[in-house]
Image (cartoon, rainbow, N blue to C red):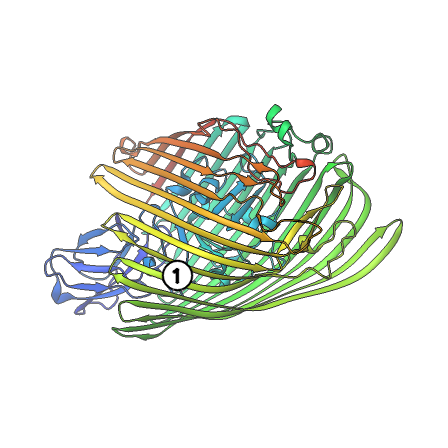
Amino acid sequence: MLLLAGSTSFFGQSSFIHGTVYDAETGEPVGNAIVLSACNDRTWVSDALGGFTINSTDQCDSLKINHPSYRTAELRYPKDGLVVLLQPDALTILSDAVVAAKAADADTRSTPASVVTLKSPILTADDQSSLSLALNSVPGVQFEQRGLGGSRRINIRSSMVRSPFAVRNFQLYLDQFSLTSPDGQVALELIDPFDLAQLTVVKGPAANSWGAGIGGALLAESKRAPGGGSAVLGSSITAGSFGFVRSTSALSVSGSQFNLRISHIHQETDGYRLQEFNKRRQLSMRLQYYASNTLDYTLWSTVYEGKWGLPGGLAADQAAEDPTSASPYAVDNFTHVHRRRFRTGITQRWTHRYFQNLTTVHINTTTKINPFGTSPFFNGYKDEAAEGFGVRNQTNINLVSRQKLDIDVRAYVQYLNEDNNLSEFDNVSGVGGAFRYENQTLSEELTAGFLTRFEISENLLVNAGITYTDRSMAGNNRSVILGEELLVDVNRNFDAWLPRIGLSYALTENHFIVAGASRAYSPPSLFELVEPLTGLLSPDLLAEVAVNYEAGAKGRIGSHLNYHLNAYLTNVSDAIRQNIDINGAEFFANQGDMTLHGVEGRLLYNRDLSENVQLSAYLNGALQRHEWLIDDEDLFIDSPYQLPGTPRATAATGADLRLKAGFFVNVHWQWSDTAPANSRNTDFISAFDVLNSKIGWDFNRILPEGWDANVFFGAQNILNEHYTSFVNFDAFGGRYFNPMPRRNYYGGIELRYQLR
């Protein structure tokens, strides 16, 4: 599919025609697009910034634009300059352009990293209450949540093994703005499927250029207004089982020099279980201003408020007898999280033909109220507030561009600063009681480095770079222990050099073998450092260090089938392990090492079956042998043990069928093997499979011009599987289980009006 936006001549009546190719969904330039003249087979290739130039003497009737990650487009030969918007292939594996040190998308089949980019329709294939379905379609990735849109966490190759709560051990960015605090906490709740054009998953230490974390990085891109001087107003409402209600609205306006999108999201549910309610609302704005052909600015702001219940884990017999129940203590003491966030920032992008500089500045504030606990022996009331800022500068330079040698360099530096104030009190029926401790921590993180991309001849691609990252935490603590007040200052610092190299060799035009090695580190986050009784920062907890080796094959078979098969080995030293004391309180310690072996495979099929029928499908799977090598004989007798919460095998498949008449249907299936519930591997979570489906009809063809509408209905957990997510691994008393909703349904309608 192709759209044309506002043709303008760059140089008047010259003998050349200049054009630029953009991604229709993200607005980013598309490099390496092949522009083909239909009458004489002459070809041109768009540069790193999407630009191409055609000699006007070569004019004929039409042009064809090809790119392996986009739908082929055809258009009549222009008389002057043009802007081409290419529609991405659904579910296509795309390049992580920045990790590859390329200013724009390259042919990702040759990218020597484990990267998957998710776009529509996979991001909108369910009720959109979370990113669960989309991220669980990626091999090696598990998205876990309580109920529908409640507490959430992400497991990328066992990155969550030290995260019983909160989200950490990877990096999250939205439009180049960091959504990860310098203390390691990730604001995952700020990204919603409704606002996303695409979400790129970079797995493992190969993402070390984005900062600390062994899991990798999530790189999100916001939706933009359609080009061509249009204005679009849209709204939707969805209702479903367990009191689920979700409404969205957006205003999108574009002009010759600006692109504006304002969105609002409201979502709430009573929950499948007692004390599993959640409610959230978010208002976001993105304004991009094009000051000139080479300079633009983007202003982004979001305001978020969320409140979700904490029902507590259940033992196996409790989950079997009544999966909708909750911990009695949680109900009686109204355990929940009430979080508010505000973030705003500005980006400046300056572009030259062989040079691009990107600078971002942002500020953020947050507050959190958190009455917690599962028993009279383990409980509390946390009151948290934080404010911070961040600055990032990134420069991409094309040093050499010749027929058999292309060299790109990307240099980057980022500084994050956040002041966090955490107080804890007794939990008295959901409100704060007697004072326990107060901890004020200043967290700072510096990340700097460079990546170089060498494209040698037509067969060999080499990526090499190094990152330096330094995280410091300065804590001032006041606590009351046995009636006595204690004042303690603790400073912690973690730093590391993180090299990376990747190789890709083209066996043929469409088949590549890739290999790489990289190093990553993951310092303990603030909530892992804080000792539960005193609130002090632990003086002994060390950063995890990981070394990763990876190899595989990528390519395309025919015109419609993409494949990616890779194997990896990651060795993690000084592994941080969650421990549970006799009262159920969590604390963390370095205990042994981890060895992560895995094989991941992914097939993607996209094809127009006819002029009226479009099919997209995927099939993926992962085999994972992730083990803990414990060196404490008092804890374990026989080592190694399989990591808790990570199954030995996973699989997922799905298909999306769309008719020109407006009807669409999708089906998605996910399977997970048994997984240990505790580090000793004496208790296990049963294997499960989940089947979801959604159908709808877009009836814009019968509406007046400018109007668009669709109705949709969906069913989740169609097989009525009894399964658990958000496993409380190593939980005291075997309370591992957070049962997920049984078979449930939803339906809704979406309306849009477009005025050009």
Residue 513 lies, in percent from the top left, at 33, 60
Identity of the residue drawn at 37% across and 69% down: 462
Dividing the picture into quadrants, the one containing residue 730 is top right
Residue 32 lies, in percent from the top left, at 28, 62
Image vertical order of residue 349 relative to residue 119, above or below: below
Q: Could you say which is closer to the camera, residue 353 or residue 154?
A: 154
The extreme right residue here reads 483
Dividing the picture into quadrants, the one containing residue 95 is bottom left
Amino acid under disc 1: Ala
Residue 150 lies, in percent from the top left, at 57, 38
Image vertical order of residue 686 relative to residue 167, above or below: above
Give the structural element (helix, strand or loop) at label 1: loop
Q: Answer left or right for 58 relative to 203.
A: left
Residue 158 can be seen in this image: no
Identity of the residue drawn at 72% across and 65% down: 491
The extreme front residue here reads 638
- The residue where tag 1 is placed is 97
Q: Answer left or right for 537 relative to 649.
A: right
Q: Answer left or right for 118 relative to 71.
A: right
Residue 559 can be seen in this image: yes
Q: Could you say which is closer to the camera, residue 391 or residue 138?
A: 138
Mark 1, other Cα within 10 Å: few <14 / some 14–19 / many ≥20: some
Q: Could you say which is closer to the camera, residue 240 or residue 22?
A: 240
Residue 487 lies, in percent from the top left, at 83, 59
Image vertical order of residue 490 relative to residue 382, above or below: below
Q: Answer left or right for 593 relative to 395.
A: right
Q: Count the labels in the image.
A: 1
Image vertical order of residue 326 relative to residue 604, above or below: above
